[in-house]
Image: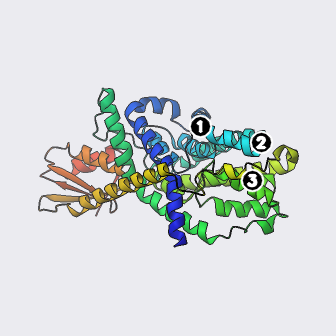
Amino acid sequence: MEILETLLFMLNEMSPYILLGFFIAGLLHAFVPARVMSRHLSGSGWRSVVKAAIIGIPLPLCSCGVLPTAVAMRRNGASSAASSSFLIATPQTGVDSIAATYSLLGPAFAVIRPVAALVTAFAGGCLVGKAEKGSPEAQGCSRVGDDGETIPDTFAGKMKSALYYGFFRMVQSIGKWLVLGLVIAALITVCVPSDFFVSLADRPLLAMIAVVIVAVPMYVCATGSIPIALSLMLKGLSPGTALVLLMAGPAANFASITVISRTMGRRSAAVYLGSIVVGAICFGFAVDYLLPSEWFTAPLATIHGACHGVSSLSVFDTVCSVILVSLLVIAFTAQLYNRKHNKITDMTTEYHIKGMSCAHCKATIEKNLARIEGVTSVTVDLPSGVAFVEGEHDRDAVIGKIREIGFDPVDA
């Protein structure tokens, strides 16, 4: 029962930000031409990495809300390096959390948080850029080829396209991984004792490692982490340990790790996570041993006022949760329906394809193969990686088109 209550609470905490992330992803898809994103954020050079971090730092998106936006950036031509930089920087801070940090933890923390986010995002993005070179796995959803969708020129048409892309196609792409990450995070939140860190007050390194182990998998937003960090300091842990929570907690959880691994590759996900962990610990030690401890003294009276939505369920958050669950149900039902109604006839040829990882990949393959002469219909079953092509067609033409759009046909 406690796990269910925690799951519902976390869903309420996350859902407004996830919906905002889906909406921003849709807007990027409909209003920002792929060539613009590609021009500014393509390549693994440091300029694109810095631009992505600077764009992300002020945005009020959590580690789950940022996922749809980052995936959309990636598909619109942004490099893995820039997308990873955006993923690391954005959830660590935002205009709302900077203000809340200043009010609760003082000006030193309010300045250090965005600086730490910028540095770790820059380092992580550059490392991902190096790691992805020569790695086919890292190419995941980087294909920005034609997916068959024509975006209207009118504002109303673009908004319709944005809503469809953000709240249907993106939900189909990453919804399963968000649900999986949410369940795992709820289990960890319930199973780890609340006083786990108190016994480590005299061992800062162990305390930081323990904070990382617990904070990285579970969900905590940038603003919600502030009173938790303050409570750790009040119980005797160092300001550096509190900063580790402020950095690592919002920047990653199981939902973000699973989605990044799925869309950008396991190597990029490992570098992304390592950058957050190492960066958080390094900045934690810098705070403890290089800066005056009195800089990090915070007022105690406001500790209970900062954590949004902990003691009661907000009507707005609940409505957002209902909307998100409804979108997930619709997306999953559509996927099941498509799988169930794959009609196999004597005119159907199966093509096993490597490299498909999301609804965007599915749409790209279906639209492009449908244009081949003799093909009457195409249905892609994403989980099995099989495309069912109907009609009298040239097999070599289909295989050639699959390779042309960036995927790998496999001999069944």
Q: Indicate which disc, 3 or 2, sits on the residue closer to the N terminus.
A: 2
Q: Compared to 329, does 35 lie above or below?
A: above
In this rendering, position of residue 114 left or right of residue 129: right
- C-beta proximity under 8 Å, tags 2 and 1: no
In this rendering, position of residue 244 left or right of residue 258: right
Q: Which residue is drawn at 48% across and 48% down?
A: 316
> Circle 3 is placed at which residue position?
230
Q: Indicate which disc, 2 or 1, sits on the residue closer to the N terminus.
A: 1
**For this rendering, which residue is in front, 159 or 84?**
159
- Disc 3 marks a residue whose amino acid type is Leu
**Mark 3 to mark 1 CA distance (whole Å):** 31 Å
In which quadrant of the rendered view does residue 166 lie?
Answer: top left
Q: Which residue is drawn at 59% across and 54% down?
A: 252
- Disc 1 marks a residue whose amino acid type is Val
Q: Residue 149 at what x, y percent from top left? A: 29, 38
Q: Residue 239 at what x, y percent from top left? A: 80, 52
CA neighbours of label 3 inside 10 A, class few (<14), some (14 to 19), many (20+): many
> Circle 1 is placed at which residue position?
49
Q: Residue at x 59, y 35 (%)?
A: 45
**Viewer can see residue 394:** no
Q: Indicate which disc, 3 or 1, sits on the residue closer to the N terminus.
A: 1
> Circle 2 is placed at which residue position?
106
- C-beta proximity under 8 Å, tags 3 and 2: no
